[in-house]
Amino acid sequence: MSAPAAAPAPAPARRDPFPPNWPARAAWGGLALYALYAASTLEVTWERFVYGLGNGARFIGRMLPPDFSKTELLLRGLIESLEIAVIASAVGILLAMPVGLMAARNLMPRWLSWPARGLIALCRSFHAVIVAILFVKAVGFGALAGILALVVSSIGFIAKLIAEAIEEISLKPIEAMRAAGASFGGVVAMAVVPQVLDRFVGFATYQLDSNLRNSTMVGIVGGGGIGATLFTAFQKFDYDFVLAILIAIIGVIFAGELLAGWIRDTFK
């Protein structure tokens, strides 16, 4: 007599490849509700938006066509902004290098790295426009206030990136240099700099590009450059000249981006 056939094994339960993440959904839902609440308290309404479209169209109509007749005034402001950006970038990057090195926790003791990180956090706490207002009150209107504000901004940005780049390097070359009896300066020059040089060049070119843009904003609050020219044109309701200034600023930013790309490709 033949044995009874074995019962078929139960099919494995199907597993959902995309299980719902309820905490994440709740967080997104809460964020959406808060955004709606914030919009209601700030009087963000569709009627104001539609009304603003009409005002914007009339404003753009007054800007056209752009007036490039004040070439000397425009070029003077652009050249001053360029000088502010270059000086602030050079000084800020030079000061940021030792600060970033001191903030690297894999190379420096805690008693040195934490104060350096505190300085970086202080420099990053305020926007360049706010810092420019403070320097305008301290040293008066003009390019010096704009340069000092962008130097502070450059230190906060570049030093933080340098510190993070150093903390991500391989420690084997450093240990080999120390075992060979190299000084601290030799370790930095031969084991640290080669590992972060490419990234540092990228940081520096980006900061120069950023300072070109920020030089316009600090000029609006009295830091000199094309921003001061732009603010004066707004005050005089000279909107066609405002458009010419904006076009010139866009052209300078594009030229700076091309220059930054060329520098990065050269040092690769």
Image: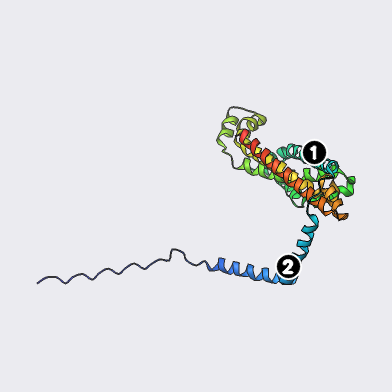
Mark 1 lies on residue: 83
**167 horizontally vs 7: left or right:** right
Q: Is residue 108 visible?
A: no
Any mark on residue 95, and which? none
Dot 1 alpha-carbon crowd within 10 angstroms: few under 14, some 14 to 19, many 20 or more: some
Q: Nearer the viewer, residue 85 or 63?
A: 63
Dot 2: element: helix
Dot 1: element: helix
Marks 2/1: CA–CA distance = 39 Å
Mark 2 lies on residue: 49
Dot 2 alpha-carbon crowd within 10 angstroms: few under 14, some 14 to 19, many 20 or more: few
Q: Which residue sits at x=67%, y=30%? A: 185
Give the label, 2 or 1, closer to the camera. Answer: 2
Of callouts 2 and 1, which one flags the residue occurring earlier in the amino acid sequence?
Answer: 2
Q: Is residue 244 above or below residue 107?
A: below
Q: Is residue 164 visible?
A: yes
**240 horizontally vs 194: left or right:** right
Q: Position of residue 40 (x, y in %)?
A: 72, 72
Q: Which residue sits at x=63%, y=69%? A: 32
**82 horizontally vs 12: left or right:** right
Q: Position of residue 26 (x, y in %)?
A: 58, 69
Q: Nearer the viewer, residue 25 or 70?
A: 70
Asked if disc 2 and disc 1 are in contact, CB closer than 8 Å, the reply is: no
Q: Which residue sits at x=85%, y=44%? A: 70
Q: Position of residue 261 (x, y in %)?
A: 64, 39
If the image is split into quadrants, where does the C terminus sit? top right
Tell me the kind of residue under disc 2.
Phe
Tell me the kind of residue under disc 1.
Glu
Q: Nearer the viewer, residue 2 or 146?
A: 146
If the image is split into quadrants, where does the N terminus sit? bottom left
Q: Position of residue 67 (x, y in %)?
A: 81, 49
